[in-house]
Image (tube, rainbow, N blue to C red):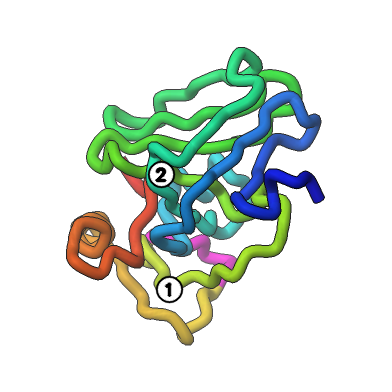
Amino acid sequence: MDLQCKTATCSGCYCGAVRLTLTAIPTSVINCHCSQCRRLGGAAYTTWVSFPRASLQVQGEEHTGRFQVTANVERHFCRYCGTHVHSYDSRMPELVGVSAGVIQESIAISPSAHFFIDDEAPWHEASEDLPMNGGESAYDRVQDQMTGPQATNGAPGARD
């Protein structure tokens, strides 16, 4: 393990051209089932880990591309291997979202809820051991929980 990764969360793309260091602890972890996360991630859902945006350091930023998913959400990816490395949501400018799958070391995280469960893939059934939030109002709950006194359940990247 990289010495820096002992005191921070390290992440990056598959080929190593883009590396992320996040110097703060995660603010939240959720499973997002919206159709955008499913299609762009190629999976039943994306598990988002949110961090304070100010804690993000990017090495190899010149190797990243950007994709404006919606008017609010911008995803950053490696232009060489295609790995999605992080996202920003203009409605939560203080946060950066990182897909849990690209975090390199083990960190003590577990999702706290499912969001946009109404968009769940028809071939997948989410476990009911976490709260289920669905429909158009799910984003309101994400935002409320992120900006409330116990911000623990939202993540950039979720729908619109």
Q: What residue type is labelled 2?
A: Gly
| Residue, disc 2 | 157
The structure residue drawn at horizontal position 54% and vertical position 44%, both measured from the top left corner, is 22
The 10 Å Cα crowd at callout 2, few under 14, some 14 to 19, many 20 or more, is many
In the depicted structure, whether residue 31 falls above or below residue 8: below
Residue 160 numbered mark, or none: none
Decide which of 117, 5 is in the foreground and name it. 5
Q: Along the horizontal axis of the image, is 110 left or right of 68?
A: right
The structure residue drawn at horizontal position 27% and vertical position 42%, both measured from the top left corner, is 92
Q: Along the horizontal axis of the image, is 60 left or right of 98?
A: right
Q: Provide residue 158's location: percent of width, then percent of height.
A: 37, 49
Q: What stretch is highlighted in magenta?
A: 119-124
Residue 112 numbered mark, or none: 1
Q: Along the horizontal axis of the image, is 102 left or right of 25?
A: right
- Is label 1 or label 2 in front? 1
Decide which of 125, 47 is in the foreground and name it. 47
| Circles 1 and 2: CB atoms closer than 8 Å | no
Residue that sits furthest to the bottom in the current view = 129
The structure residue drawn at horizontal position 25% and vertical position 69%, both measured from the top left corner, is 150
Give the SS element for disc 2: loop
Q: How many labels does the image show?
A: 2
Q: What residue type is labelled 1?
A: Ser
